[in-house]
């Protein structure tokens, strides 16, 4: 007999200068975001940035979010 796995929603919280903003994601949305981060490459970052410096900042931010997702169990193969 197999057991269905029940996933909780994921809450993402940003705190900026004492103000908090949050978003609630479903398991599917969180996995899709983790997959997107895994598949994103320099060309996407650079294409959305005004210069190389901003593209490096985007890549660094994505890496930090990717690490946090992986620590929470969202680490797609």
Image: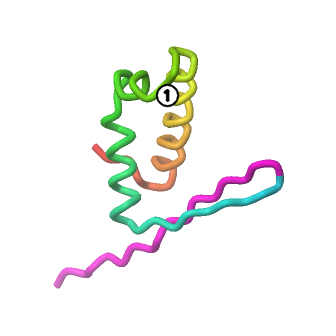
The answer to which image quadrant residue 39 occupies is: top left
- Which residue is farthest top? 52
Q: Secondary structure at mark 1?
A: helix
Label 1: few (<14), some (14–19) or many (≥20) C-alpha neighbours in 10 Å = some
Residue 4 picture location, percent across and down: 26, 80
Task: Tell me: 7 left or right of 49.
Answer: left
From this view, report whether residue 2 is shown above or below residue 41.
below
Q: Residue at x 54, y 47 (%)?
A: 68
Task: For the N terminus, give its image quadrant.
Answer: bottom left
Instruction: From the viewer's side, name the closer residue of 1 and 73.
Output: 73
Residue 54 picture location, percent across and down: 56, 22
Q: Is residue 13 magenta?
A: yes
Instruction: From the viewer's side, name the closer residue of 55 and 30.
Output: 55
- Which residue is farthest right? 18
Q: Is residue 26 magenta?
A: no
Task: Tell me: 10 left or right of 29.
Answer: right
Q: Residue at x 47, y 42 (%)?
A: 66
Task: For the C terminus, give its image quadrant.
Answer: top left
Residue 17 picture location, percent across and down: 82, 49
Q: Residue at x 31, y 76 (%)?
A: 5
Q: Residue at x 57, y 26 (%)?
A: 57
Looking at the rendered structure, the number of numbered marks drawn on it comes to 1
From this view, report whether residue 60 is shown above or below residue 73.
above
Instruction: From the viewer's side, name the closer residue of 49 and 25.
Output: 49
Q: Which residue is mark 1?
A: 59
- Which residue is farthest left? 1
Give the magenta range: 1-17
- Which residue is farthest front? 50
């Amino acid at each position: 007999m197999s057991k269905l796995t029940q996933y909780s929603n994921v809450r993402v919280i940003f705190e900026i200068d004492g103000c908090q903003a949050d978003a609630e994601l479903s398991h599917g949305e969180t996995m899709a975001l983790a997959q997107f981060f895994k598949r994103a490459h320099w060309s996407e970052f650079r294409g959305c940035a005004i210069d190389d410096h901003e593209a490096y900042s985007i890549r660094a931010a994505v890496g930090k979010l990717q690490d946090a997702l992986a620590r929470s169990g969202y680490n797609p193969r």
